[in-house]
Amino acid sequence: MSSEYKALSPETLADRLGGLDVMKKTVGRNAEGWTVREVGDGNLNLVFIVEGEAGSVIVKQALPYVRLVGDSWPLPLKRAFFEYHALIRQEARDPGSVPEVLHFDETQALIIMERLQPHIILRQQTMEGRKVEGLGRAMGLFAARTAFRGSDLSMKAGDKKADQALFAGNVELCDITETLVFTDPYYDAEMNRHTTPQLDGIVADLRRDEALKVEVQHMKRAFTSRGETMCHGDLHAGSIMVTDTESRVIDPEFAFYGPFGFDIGMLIGNYLMAYHAMPAHISDANACGEFQAWILEVIEETWSVYCAEFLRLWRTERTGILYPKALYEDQGHDFASESAAQQLLGEIFRDLVGFAGIEMHRRILGLAHVAELDTIEDEDLKAKCEAKCLKLGQMLVMNRNRLTGMDAVLAAARQTETGGQA
Amino acid sequence: MSSEYKALSPETLADRLGGLDVMKKTVGRNAEGWTVREVGDGNLNLVFIVEGEAGSVIVKQALPYVRLVGDSWPLPLKRAFFEYHALIRQEARDPGSVPEVLHFDETQALIIMERLQPHIILRQQTMEGRKVEGLGRAMGLFAARTAFRGSDLSMKAGDKKADQALFAGNVELCDITETLVFTDPYYDAEMNRHTTPQLDGIVADLRRDEALKVEVQHMKRAFTSRGETMCHGDLHAGSIMVTDTESRVIDPEFAFYGPFGFDIGMLIGNYLMAYHAMPAHISDANACGEFQAWILEVIEETWSVYCAEFLRLWRTERTGILYPKALYEDQGHDFASESAAQQLLGEIFRDLVGFAGIEMHRRILGLAHVAELDTIEDEDLKAKCEAKCLKLGQMLVMNRNRLTGMDAVLAAARQTETGGQA
């Protein structure tokens, strides 16, 4: 390939990539016979499925601008570099959780990776009312393992500092989160949109809530300064691909060093939105209620698995500089070590609740929405579902330091959903 | 100068640096007539005073090992690079607070800087019972200005992330803090020393305090992961040079991105040790009590000036991405902005109290002690002063989230000093 960046197209891909050994081996030697489809449905990149006689792969290439917005919003190609570095770390930290990377070309901002098949995006699956066996367990393990193993609890101090410095270069993608998640939704910013006029009143109320805006900015400060571990950075139901029995994580181009609770918080925020959106997707009330109950079970399981795995790693893999065994176990103070772990999990819980609430706001008030809500054609019904998310999000942000645990989050969700009538 | 690193000596300095324009201009053209004295009394570096017919300068050069320990403990020369970068940032953020940098040679790990004259090290001054007019104000301003202006409250997000990545390279000096401050003192580590046998009992008690060890490791986690601002990293009474009326800060080679409260916490921990050590340095009880009262006033003033300056900068220079005016002042929500600032100061206070307590422990239990205590010849008296520091430090770490404010810290110090008899 040429040394200068050039966006691929279905027409040029075979010609440009056909000479790569990895493509010959994985897709087939007869590049002229490849089928190439562009399937990028995300906001940022080109994504191709390339099929040949030997098999198929995904070719993902960054574009020099935000696809959702156009070339008026430039975005550096370097995000492919961060995605690559995040993918190989996630694979090492939770083997099998992400697509295998087959090839990376930094100049072309291009990653060739394993095609997940017959996986579909999680939110497509759930919008069709189909469950995923083991989803909570898979995501709880992924979040706990990547959190623990990317931190000073596990890594050598110099390696962690070097990785933190590396991902500090992901400035523009962090800026998207800093602006679109933590700021714009809380005032009348240019790129915002919300369901109008139905939500106008509640949106105005929310933007008048000064205490809420203070809490959200405290959480934003945690986002920008608490470099505890390498986060995926964009872990929502569009970054998870599933079959009925398997779950894999994709698209970590927003990777950065941030709070332990960030990824799992964003994810749970997305689950809670799906929960409130389900009545628009499953018309049968009983079937809908049963599916909603499953979503809450997934949340519960994600967090309980996270805690159990975090504790297991704490006991067996705590090789980093924090809470060293020399101070605890080696002194016969095993229980102090357990206390420290439980206190840390408490802190992670309080953070994740806050991040979940903020995610629920930005997906309804900001630029980027979620399909579970955005595809609801009946604007009144849509607004009704969205209003529940806004209220629950506000409750979570404001009460994150005072809740008894995940049971309280789920109880609040049920109460919000039924309005006290269930 | 040669492109290969070579340590300077008083004999070689004139020959090696005589050709530099900055030396000709500042010290004088007649290098053969220069007087060169090596005066490094710190733990890590060579420091020369070079005097000539035009004036004098300081030449500071890093050694490739820890001077205090010897070449068995190698330490990278790159720390001069971090010191240089910290010095120019501190000068920009609090003009006049640090020596002017005249020349930096990265290969030689060498900084030529303004000679502060007739300044002496703060702890020399206080051990002689001499006050420094304006000390609290100068240090409160320095700590607040460098904290605020090095953070996401002020800097452009990309600049802050780039600086954080740059200082993330200061691995070995952070390791010293991580090990010698936050870990070794709390168990029987090899390099530790304490006044024995007088302190053996209290030291054993302290190392059995499991809750204390958990709190300290939470603070260590803040040190390694909460990159809120560029910290000096080693702000104690040996890093401040004073006259009777002026205070300047030196030696920021430990600079790193850390918690807002780190520098001011370390500093206040050092003041509190000086407070408890004074009876060994001023024999007249009234004079001693009067001087001790002054130390507590300095602490009070340092913190009150810090708060006032932080709030002033918050109102007038909040140009960063955190707590943006678009969300508050521009919406007529000025008071929310004030609330956020006060909550943040509360958080900084709770952190600084913890860091102060830990600093008081490590200077008595760890490798590097402070002259105020270490020079007390009567071992029983020394142990008595040190025991007070250990107890107060423990109280501060364990109660940092529950105190009403700095008045409570000072009251606890007075109570510790008098044992309730004053």
Image (spheres, coloured by chain):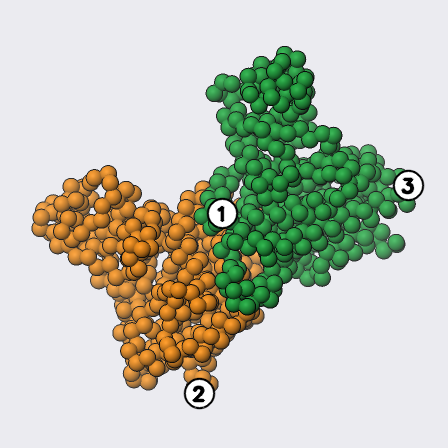
Chain colours: A green, B orange
The quadrant of the image that shows the C terminus of chain B is: bottom left
CA–CA distance in space, label 3 to label 1: 50 Å
The residue that label 1 is drawn on is A160
Badge 1 sits on which subunit? A
Q: Amino acid at mark 1?
A: Lys
The answer to whether residue A318 of the structure is visible from this angle is yes
B357 vs A401: above or below:
below
**Of residues A212 and B384, which is closer to you in this image?**
B384
Query: Looking at the image, do the residues carrying marks 3 and 1 touch, with CB atoms under 8 Å apart?
Result: no
Residue under the image location 60 percent in, 21 percent down: A25
Secondary structure beneath label 1? helix
Query: In the drawing, what numbered circle is on residue A323?
Result: none
CA–CA distance in space, label 2 to label 3: 77 Å
Query: In the drawing, what numbered circle is on residue A284?
Result: 3
Residue under the image location 68 percent in, 38 percent down: A248
Q: Position of residue B342 (x, y in %)?
A: 55, 61
- Dot 2 crowding, Cα within 10 Å, few <14, some 14–19, many 20+: few
Quadrant housing residue A54: top right
The quadrant of the image that shows the N terminus of chain B is: top left
Q: Position of residue A386 (x, y in %)?
A: 77, 43
Q: Which of the marked residues, 3 or 1, is nearer the chain's N terminus?
A: 1
Give the farthest residue toward the bottom.
B421
Q: Amino acid at mark 3?
A: Asp
The residue that label 2 is drawn on is B421
Secondary structure beneath label 2? loop
**Of residues B263 and B394, which is closer to you in this image?**
B394
